[in-house]
Image (tube, rainbow, N blue to C red):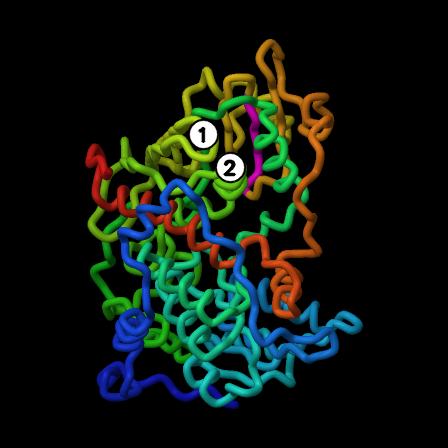
Amino acid sequence: MKIKKTPSQDNKFNALPPQSRRQFLRASALSVAAASFASYVGKAQDGPAAAPYVGNVKGANDKINIACIGVGGQGESDTGDILRLSQKANSNVNLVALCDVDQEHVDKMAAKIPEAKHYSDFRTMLTEMDSSIDAVTVTIPDHNHAIATMFALKMGKHVFCQKPLTQTVYEARQVRDLAKAKKLATQMGNQGSDSSGLRRAVEVVQAGVIGNVSELHVWTNRPVWDQGLKRPARADIWPATLDWDLWIGPAKLRPFKSGTYHGFAWRGWYDFGCGALGDMACHTVNMPSRALKLGYPTVVELEESSEVFPETFPETSRIRFEFPGREGMVPLKFWWYDGNPDHKAATPLRPPPDLTKETWDVKPPENGKPKALPQAGALLVGDKGMLFSPDDYGTESYIMLKGEKEYTEMQNHPAAKAVPSKFPRSPGHKEEWIRMMRGGPPAYSNFDIAAYLTEIILLGVVASRAGAGKKME
């Protein structure tokens, strides 16, 4: 199917469908029966609800037809994963449609999947191909996650959605409730969840190897895109291949500017992304949040940041979350730090050196560079020792107990070797999602879990936007 021509810039709104994306988002939100805020506060220390189950299960020999919403950037990777699954013997997975607001992205993927139908608007695709689509992947800018996911869920489609699951706490709760009500298979794209190393770290921490954990420090080298800037004064004509109206979606319309929003640059803008925290915390906080059964925080505060701008996140920040005691675990303070070490003007905020000095030796320096703090990490501080994960996804961890002078790989540490395994290992991140559609166990990052983690992270985004020193309780 050919993508329809973009409405002219002089007459955009007259060409929008009767129910615009902005109207749809509001209508969808109001139509879903959401639990009251008070009921969630009452559950704040209890963690996510019981695991969801799937209705209308697909049999082992049934075809699962998947459409991909967003096929450029990370969407190219997610679409490629579905394509590989479809090419595996006896997988019974079909990739039936490609959807992207940028024709260039569609054309690139269509060359690999010529039999798939092509669309620019996911609403048109799902409406026209309703009975031919069982599930969708959603890999588009954050501000469109909820609207595409809700549309698909309401039509009874299983959904894989990239992180962060949504852009607001309210959207996260709506998506979670609807997925549960519809009994659909879901998974968020924080792919470290399928790692055996991540699951092993959760087992080791919960077994008490490093004792009672009262501090968590997580840092990242993001942003690696432009933020901490003002909106450009001038506008450009958008490319003929791009439908700017559809890209904007439910956000307030603004002029197109080349290299500023479309592409990888949208993450730092309040209207479209969630900054470094929203981009990476669903990865880097994934392991510790599970290991420490974080629940909801009682305090969130932006402690410090670089210069604040009206429409973009700052170049570096430090945010504190406080969690009460929960499920036998002691109260905990969690600090998030972001900032690019290579930024020419803003020195990134980082944990205290006395806590992190031994982490410098975990990874050997590259190309003769001097030793330095790893560019990303998660450090769990317990009363018996510390566990450090130096990668974005929690796939590897190191332990240093009190009295020890250096970190030891977790799998080689004597204290960890004695801990029995209790979590099943994964066949693959998207494979878990497919397996859930066929009546298997819930995917490890299904929306019941993913929405919960997303809420916590998005409270940090709210604190960042509120400003330094404004304590949220």
Q: Nearer the viewer, residue 154 or 101?
A: 154
Amino acid type of the residue tagged 2 in the rendering: Pro
The structure residue drawn at horizontal position 28% and vertical position 42%, both measured from the top left corner, is 464
Apparent side of residue 163 relative to residue 251 in the rendered image (left or right): right
Label 2 crowd bin: few (<14), some (14–19), many (20+), radius 10 Å: many
Q: Quadrant of residue 19?
A: bottom left
The structure residue drawn at horizontal position 47% and vertical position 56%, both measured from the top left corner, is 448
**Magenta stretch encompasses residue 119:** no
- Judge whether residue 236 can be spotted in this image: no
Residue 360, given in percent of the width and then of the height, sits at 56, 23
Q: Quadrant of residue 21?
A: bottom left
| Mark 2 to mark 1 CA distance (whole Å) | 8 Å
The structure residue drawn at horizontal position 67% and vertical position 41%, both measured from the top left corner, is 422
Residue beneath disc 1 = 216
- The mark nearer the N terminus, 2 or 1, is 1
Label 2 SS: helix
Amino acid type of the residue tagged 1 in the rendering: Leu
Apparent side of residue 350 relative to residue 170 in the rendered image (left or right): right
The structure residue drawn at horizontal position 51% and vertical position 37%, both measured from the top left corner, is 288
Q: Are marks 2 and 1 in contact (CB under 8 Å)?
A: yes
Q: Nearer the viewer, residue 462 or 183?
A: 183
Vertical comparison of 352 with 206: above or below: above
Vertical comparison of 155 with 181: above or below: below
Q: Nearer the viewer, residue 348 or 195?
A: 195
- Quadrant for the C terminus, please: top left
User: Which range of residues does the magenta coloring cover?
Assistant: 386-392
Q: Nearer the viewer, residue 377 or 322?
A: 322
Residue 81, given in percent of the width and then of the height, sits at 64, 65
Residue beneath disc 2 = 288
Residue 11, given in percent of the width and then of the height, sits at 23, 86
